[in-house]
Amino acid sequence: MPAGSMVATVVALAAGTYALRCAGPALRDRVQLPHWLTRRITMATVVLLAALVATQALVDGEGFAGWARPAGVLAGGVLAWLRAPFLVVVLAGAAVAAALRMAGVP
């Protein structure tokens, strides 16, 4: 792709992103979404976040990340579910993964 086309594409995407970001606050009071759509959007957000967490926890490059990383994510997830402070969640997840790696678990 020529440099001019790439710059034009980036500028067009930036302008579109800016327009969408400005449209949100401008249309907040004018547009009412149906209740069923609001519920589905909320569920889609949760599903997307869960998919991102699963991808980062289970895959490293093109292969399986090993058992230590998913165990750390699981420990952090349990603590987050129990409403532990964020710092405790992060440190516990890292500690579990580090302990398993020190024990020889990949």
Image (cartoon, grey):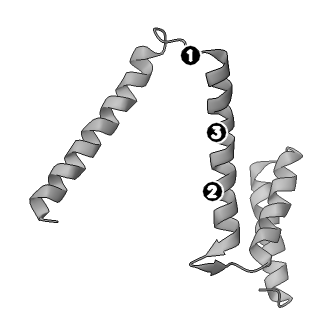
Q: Position of residue 99 (x, y in %)?
A: 84, 80
The span from disc 1 to disc 3 (Cα, nearest Å) is 15 Å
Q: What residue is shown at x 63% (from left), y 47% (from top)?
A: 48
Q: Which circle marks residue 33 in the picture? A: 1
How far is disc 1 from disc 2 in space, using C-alphas?
A: 26 Å
- Residue 45's x, y, as percent? 63, 40
* Image spot of residue 3 (x, y percent): 12, 63
Residue 29 appears in the figure? yes
- Quarter of the figure with the C terminus: bottom right
Between label 2 and label 3, give the one nearer the viewer. 3
Q: How many marks?
A: 3
**Extreme residue in the top direction:** 30
SS state under label 1: loop
Look at mark 2 in the image and give the residue it sits on: 52
| Callout 2 amino acid | Leu
Between disc 1 and disc 2, whose residue precedes?
1
The residue pinned by badge 3 equals 44
Q: Is residue 2 left or right of residue 83?
A: left
Q: Amino acid at mark 3?
A: Ala
Residue 5 in the image: state x and y as whole percent: 13, 56
Sequence-first tag of 2 and 3: 3
Where 44 sits versus 106, above or below?
Answer: above
Residue drawn 82% across the image and 86% down it: 105
**In contact (CB < 8 Å): disc 2 and disc 3:** no
Label placed on residue 100: none
Q: Quick one: label 1, few (<14), some, or many (20+) residues within 10 Å?
A: few
Give the amino acid type for the residue marked by disc 1 in the picture.
Leu
For the residue pair 85 and 7, the one nearer the viewer reads as 7
Is label 3 in a helix, a strand or a loop? helix
Q: Is residue 16 above or below residue 33?
A: below
CB under 8 Å between discs 1 and 3: no
